[in-house]
Image: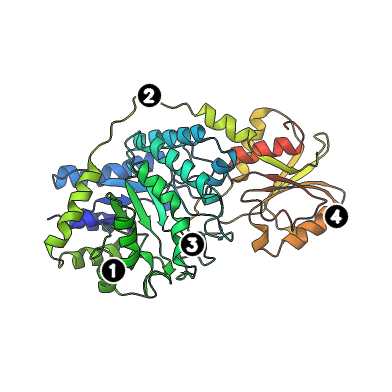
Amino acid sequence: MRYGLFIQTGLRGVEREESLKYISKMLPLSVVLFGNDFSNEKELTELISKINHIFVVENNVPAPFIAVDQEGGNVVRIPWIDYSPSNLFLGKLDNPEFTNYVGMLTGYQLNSLGIRWNLAPVLDTLNGYNPVILERSFGSDLETIGKHGAEFIKGIQSYDVRATAKHFPGHGSVMVDSHVDLPEDKRNVESIINDSYPFRKAIDAGVSSIMLSHVLYNSLDENYPATLSAEVQKLLRHSFNYRNLIISDSMDMKAVKGRYDVSEIIKGSIKNEVDVIENADIVGSMEFYEQIQNIDTALLKPKEERIVQFMQPFKKLSYKPSPLLMRSVETVSSRIRRRKILNPDIEADLVLMDSKDESQVAEISKSTNLVSTHLADLNLKLKLHYGTEFLENMKESGRQIILVGRNEHLRSRVNLMNAISGKNNCVFISTSFDGDIGIVSEKMGYISAYSKKPSVIVGAILKAYGFMA
């Protein structure tokens, strides 16, 4: 039996050549890549080629499933392809056909790069504005999440790229980020199962894999998070009648790592209903690989059968979806929540306030250069000064200011923003959900973009100037 089939590993933890030696020994089902594994398309292509060579040429086994988290919005590993603005953007637009198209375009472009597994979409419900979920969710309405999740799944899988519904049974009702600690969901069983409705729709849509969350659901299991809980896994496998692949969230996250030892993780995952352990750190992956070899093969056999089924190719559409529709829709689909029109003939400051990512899952930040390039291509000759300076440095008054930021309810800077809006003509472009509109000064214009994607920001800027309704 090839024991690496039960592992999805990242390359973190050692130098590149050393990681490739680990890959050669382990021969995992999948290698998950992150943005810091490559700088451009050439490096990505060369890396995938090296990995495939180890499998196909050196070891005479099928190429692994190269995987990424290409969710769209703030969680994007490959920034140069036409990625989704964000799930919340799609949910607010509420056009299922467009969401299906976004899935198709994502699938086509990933497949073209040799990537056959996307750890998306997020099907968590936006409850309580969990800071690690936010615009990664399609919204707060279960029907909307289920509908758009299913369409994205069908779209991406039509180009032979496996989708992953995550994070079962739902990560949206806890405020703690499982990358840094173990969240506890203290709701009753009925509420938890109710929020898992979008996963039923994903199963109906034929989703290839479902990822378990690192959340402790007290009413289901007082001791273990979903990734290690027999009760939660039985709920998915038996109550939901799910027959495809179950994968864990990464076992190097602090919700699990350091809290449970390797043998306990193996017992709670692979010895239960989990088929594949994800671990971003390759040294840790080797520990799991060695432990899995001690498991009775009779227990592993049904998992191996599901994995073999997972590896079977889908019938792939032959035509290329045009990216023009994506670019058109994302430019016009931001929403003016509080109108204030700026004068294009007067100088203005464009302040991109989020100079670093707020979550460990996000790797792609807004780029001042990309926003300015997009605006320059439109040849509007706006008198804009670009900056990322913090608000305390803005001493002048009587200026036009466009502030671009995310999740003001989680920050102390909102008081500075409101003070500035009392002395200047300001518009705020929100790149996340619009739950903070109530704390942003009524003197300030407010536009919901639901995304950090530069093209979406540009569309919102055009609305701030009154060029679009």
Front residue of this view, candidates 220 and 413: 220
Left or right of residue 406: residue 115: left
What residue would you read off at disc 2?
319
First in sequence: mark 4 vs mark 3: 3
> What residue is pinned by disc 3?
191
Q: Disc 1 to disc 3, how far (Cα)? A: 24 Å
Q: How many C-alpha atoms fall within 10 Å of the one at disc 4: few (<14), some, or many (≥20)?
A: some
- For the residues labelled 2 and 1, the Cα–Cα distance comes to 43 Å
Amino acid type, label 4: Gly
Q: Which amino acid, mark 2?
A: Tyr
Residue 352 drawn at (x, y percent): 66, 50
Horizontally, residue 268 falls left or right of residue 399, namely left
Q: Residue furthest top?
A: 319
Asked if residue 329 is positioned above or below residue 236 in the image, the reply reads above
Q: Which residue is mark 4?
A: 422
Which label sits in the foreground, 3 or 2? 3
Q: Is residue 351 visible?
A: yes
Q: Mark 4 touching mark 2, by CB under 8 A?
A: no
